[in-house]
Every structure is written in structure tokens, then in C-alpha cells.
């Protein structure tokens, strides 16, 4: 079994980073022999999408050495994604959406022929069933039924784009109000939900 842990906060001591670490710890308890790939997007340069991205429509044998080099980051990030059974994504809310590093990662892994197919019925995701846990942190609160719910362009976007490449088994755990008084309680509640989520998975694995 393999876990892919992705962090995308710019801050070293970030809320999402602490929570993804906790989630990885819980996963490891259930899979002591499992492998963990930790991809910290803040410590790598992801190439921007340029005109060279058009090379994704060519056959591998048609690529020039320069095109192959340009696509090598995408190849590697997609391979990590494909090889993982469980994916934990740490997503800080920046300007009501995701960080630019997480967006850059998404731009590299949504790729025709690799994670996305096109058929007579339009696009379909190519990633087979995997479990995804998205852990977000927000300065404010965007809970269901509140006036600010409509400003959450982070969770709906992530749900859509992950589903677009076939990742439909997605659980969101939010640490809301991190810049408010309720921040500590909200952090602890998120931590509790992470522990419960992995305990539940362990019970299901034992039952099967
Ligand atoms: C550049 C930037 C933009 C932010 N934009 C928002 C925002 O739109 N809404 C919000 O509720 N919090 C916003 N915040 C607060 C963060 O979501 C909050 O501090 C959260 O804990 C960040 O996650 P992290 O601790 O994992 O870095 C912003 C923070 C930064 C640094």
C-alpha cells in the first residue's frame, strides 16, 4: 500500500502541514509496511504551463529531447499519483481558493491520455478508484448554511477537478476560523475527524 501526502502551504509551521502529518501518522499505524511519498510543493519549482504543453498531445516517440525534459515533472507527479492507494492533500485557503503551488501541481497532473480520456461522451477520468482526503485550513469560516458558504471556491473546485480525473472518493476535513478565537477548537476538531476517519477505515479493512 502506498500513501501520497501533498503539502501546499507556503508556511513551514502551517495548520494544514500539521494536520497532513497527523493523517500520515494515522495511515502508517494501519499500514506499518506501507510506503509514503511526501511531496512538499513549497520546496520545488513546478514548471508553468507554456506553449510546450501542446507536446502532451504527441506520442512519446514523437517528442524532442526538449519536450521530454519539459514534461518530465508532469510524468513524475502523475506516476506518484497513479502509484498511490491513498492521497492526502493539504490545502490552505488563499483568496477564497487554493495556493498557486497546488494549482501548479493540478496543471501538471490533469493530462490528456494519462489522467484524462476523451470519448464519444466527452471527457472521462482515467485514475482508478483511490481514496482522497483533502485537509483544508481557512482564516475564516465557510460552513454549510452560513452567509460565507458561497465564497468557498476552494472545496468545490477541488472536488470538481479531482472528479474530472476520476478521483471521486474524496473526504474533506476543514480546519475553519484559524485566524479567529475559535481556531484552536476548530484545529482540534479537525484532528479528531482525521483520527476517526482512519479508525473507521481500519475497522472496514478488518471487516473485509
Ligand atoms: C495569501 C493568503 C491569502 C489568504 N486568503 C484567505 C481567504 O481568502 N479566506 C480565508 O478564510 N483565509 C485566508 N487566508 C488565511 C489562511 O487560509 C489561514 O491562515 C490558513 O491557516 C492557511 O493554511 P496554512 O496554515 O496551512 O498555511 C489567507 C492567508 C494567506 C497567507
Image (cartoon, helix red, strand yellow):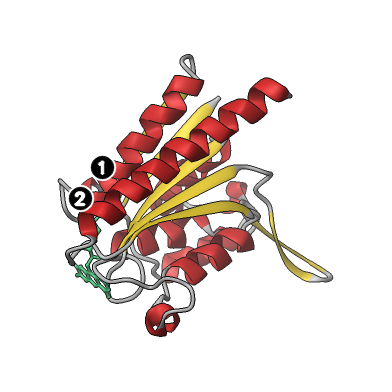
* The disc label shown at residue 14, or none: 2
Marks 2 and 1, how far apart at CA: 6 Å
- Are the residues flagged by discs 2 and 1 in contact, CB closer than 8 Å? yes
Quadrant where the N terminus lies? top right
Picture coordinates of residue 5 (x, y %)? 40, 39
Question: Exactly how many numbered labels are in the figure?
Answer: 2
Number of the label disc, if any, that sits on residue 191: none
Q: Which residue is mark 1?
A: 18
Q: What is the secondary structure assignment of the residue under circle 2?
A: loop
Q: Dot 1, how many residues are within 10 Å of its Cα: few (below 14), some (14-19), or many (20+)?
A: some
Q: Residue at x 27, y 70 (%)?
A: 94
Quarter of the C terminus within the rendering = top right
Q: Tell me the element at label 1.
A: helix
Counting from the top left corner in percent of width and height, residue 187 is at: 28, 51
- Residue 99 seen: yes
User: Which residue shows up at 44% across the image and 83% down it?
Assistant: 150
Q: Is the residue at mark 1 in contact range of ligand 1, meaning its CB lies under 8 Å from it?
A: yes
Q: Position of residue 173 (x, y in %)?
A: 43, 53
Amino acid at each position: 500500500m502506498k500513501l501520497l501526502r501533498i503539502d501546499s502551504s507556503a508556511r513551514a509551521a502551517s495548520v494544514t502541514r500539521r494536520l497532513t502529518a497527523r493523517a500520515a501518522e494515522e495511515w502508517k499505524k494501519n499500514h506499518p509496511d506501507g510506503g509514503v511519498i511526501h511531496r512538499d510543493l513549497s520546496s520545488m519549482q513546478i514548471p508553468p504551463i507554456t506553449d510546450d504543453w501542446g507536446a502532451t498531445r504527441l506520442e512519446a516517440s514523437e517528442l524532442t529531447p526538449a519536450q521530454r525534459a519539459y514534461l518530465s515533472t508532469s510524468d513524475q507527479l502523475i506516476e506518484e499519483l497513479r502509484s498511490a492507494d491513498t492521497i492526502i492533500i493539504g490545502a490552505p485557503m488563499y483568496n477564497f481558493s487554493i495556493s498557486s503551488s497546488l494549482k501548479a501541481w493540478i496543471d501538471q497532473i490533469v493530462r490528456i491520455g494519462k489522467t484524462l480520456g476523451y470519448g464519444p461522451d466527452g471527457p472521462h477520468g482515467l485514475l482508478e478508484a483511490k481514496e482522497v482526503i483533502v485537509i483544508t485550513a481557512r482564516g475564516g469560516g465557510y460552513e454549510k448554511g452560513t452567509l460565507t458558504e458561497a465564497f468557498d471556491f476552494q472545496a468545490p473546485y477541488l472536488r470538481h477537478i479531482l472528479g474530472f480525473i476520476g478521483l471521486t472518493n474524496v473526504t474533506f476535513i476543514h480546519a475553519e476560523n484559524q485566524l479567529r478565537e475559535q481556531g484552536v477548537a476548530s484545529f482540534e476538531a479537525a484532528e479528531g475527524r482525521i483520527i476517526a476517519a482512519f479508525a473507521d477505515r481500519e475497522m472496514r479493512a478488518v471487516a473485509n
